[in-house]
Image: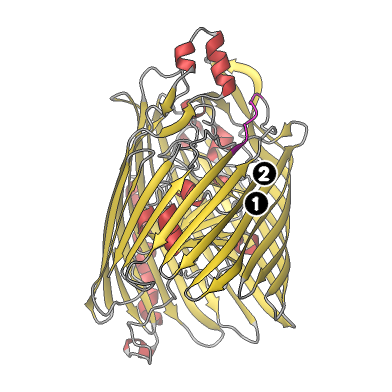
Amino acid sequence: MYRACVERTFKRIAASALLAGAACLPTGAFAQDAGGPHAPAHAEPSDDAIVVTGHPPVDFAILSATTSLAGDALLAETRGQIGDTLAKLPGVSATSFAPGASRPVLRGYSGDRVAVLIDGIGSIDASTVSNDHAVVLDPLSIDHIDVFHGPAVLLFGGNAIGGAVNARDKRIPRRVPDSAEMTVMGGYGTAADERSIGGSLGFAVAPRLAAHLDASWRKSDDLRIGGNLLSRSLRADLIAQGNEDLADAAGRIPNSATRTFTLGGGLAFIDTGGDIGVSVQRYDTRYGVPSRPGGEEDPVSIDLVQTRIDLRGSVKLSGLLDSLRFRGVYGDYSHAELEGDAVGTRFAGEGIEFRADLVQATNNGWRGRSGIQIADRSLAIQGDEAFTPDNDTRRFGLFTLQSVELGSGITLEGAGRFERARVAANQIGFSRSFGLWSAAAGLSWESDGGLTLGVNYVRSARAPSPEELLSDGVHVATQSYELGDPGFGKETSDGFEAYARLKTERTNVSLTLFRTRFGGFISPIPNGEEREGFPLYRYVQVPARFTGFEASGDWQALRWSEGELTLSAAGDYTHARLEGLGAAPLIPPLRLRGGLAVRQGALRVSAEAEWNARQNRVGPAASPVPAFTLVNLGADWHPMGEDGPITLTLSADNLLDVVGRRAASVTRDFVPIAGRDVRLTARLAF
């Protein structure tokens, strides 16, 4: 019944948007302008490795991303999960639960506090419910990823306290190609014997009608590591129990293999007066869930399937308004957690999300966008790991983001959002609603020489997640008994950041300092008790403080005919404290990176070293995480020239084959990072 209701609701929204789009198209919508219907709507991403404060080629024209990943760098860093793809960006780490499940961690925040978006709308999965759940996002269909902080995040939700990650998907065409366009990508990585291949085809069906088809396949074996599988503290525990053989395990992470297949297609009508398009994707993956040694007898794996339908469109307006832009998505999601060949727990959910943005025309330096956002997600859990009852989350939001240039390089930004959130679990008679007000302001100054100075303030309000309110059971993924609190209030925060950025012909430098205070931060904390043989983690709501910095820079030290030498450096750090409890858990340590890159013609070669400090601030009942240093090499080559159809990348990550453990990972004691991984990737576009 609910599925039918959701589908009817989505169809009504889609039909309304289609009718509105058709009705609002200007009289001359079907006439070609000087650019013609084949002119690209946005510039294609460049080959820069990391673009700081770049203007992203997505449908959010007022926004500037803090960092972006595109071009050759995205090709080289693409992994099966978006968390691992972004892990080298300043201020970004990864949950790294397993090779098949890894979400991004921004400034120490993860889960529900980080929005992971596809063209500005949610991924409609269960990845925020638990660390062992994969993000449903096909990296081979993405050509640009942006990370946002500051006032802009209020466009995506007040819960995005840590920031927002937006992936630009190619599935709904943005332009009508003059001729058929094909892209084929393939790669191989030695650490997990990983093989991947994907391809897409774009073509014109009619003068104003474009189509897209794509498919991808990725398979990897158990991940090879550089040394001992288990951390020092876990090895000591096993040796004390007489399990020396288990304590000395090395070589590979058992039950960490993955397999993913995707298939998608899109169709778009594109004209000078507007555009509208729809796409369908089928995402199918199975991946192993490594277990703590001495725990589960049968290996656990997750078999996950999602069918997703997307809608995107825009209508050109005139006068004070530039355009109306809308996005909608319907997702049907399920995954089975298999214990051997038997289903232990089954997660099934559906969700819809719709947003409409009115984009203002620039008027004497004033621009902005305002809109509405509606989301409805249901999740049913049946089986041994049903640690929350079936639940439904609904959100309705109104938002605005405004920017005005005051002259002399000074820009003032302001944003506001009101959101009504409801969490319900009908089978236990639970229902709570939250009225959430969020606001932000920013002030920046840009000199003629490329220096930008700015400050931002964000007041956010987040409703507790169903897991924080309703958990009451064994959570196998975290090897704990989790207990929520139905009486939690909304989580509010006051965030401040100050930044300085310098961009010149040969220099690109960025430094950001941030500090966020929470009135009631929600976190699971062990209290020394046990339930059903597992340590009890009780969710608590206490004041908290997050402070830190992120920095990056590159300098073109030398240049010559058709070549250059560039030096780069980056660093990030987060200090997080829960009042009365000490250090917040799962916070990345100080990280510093330095490197150089040499380009000669169509060939670019790079080398870098990354130092991750020892993390002693690990929270209650956890062991410190040792320091480790990575040495990485890379090269990319365009054998037929920079604009040629072929791109080849070769990289050697963790060249010294060290054992490293991410402090943000709940499985770090028995899931270290990959050992030496030599990776070859090729892209052919024509």
Q: Residues within 10 Å of mark 1 (few under 14, many from 20)?
A: many
Q: Position of residue 149 (x, y in %)?
A: 62, 59
Distance CA(mark 1)–CA(mark 2): 7 Å
Q: Is residue 100 magenta?
A: no
| Quadrant in the picture for the C terminus | bottom left
Instruction: Identify whether 18 is placed above or below 168.
Output: below
Answer left or right for 299 relative to 633: left
Q: Secondary structure at mark 2?
A: loop
Q: Secondary structure at mark 1?
A: strand
Residue toward you, 314 or 135? 135
Q: Is residue 143 visible?
A: no
Location of mark 2 (residue): 590
Location of mark 1 (residue): 571
The residue under the point 61% across, 67% down is 557
| Amino acid type for the residue under numbered disc 2 | Leu
Would you identify the image quadrant in which residue 448 lies? bottom right
The residue under the point 63% across, 17% down is 529
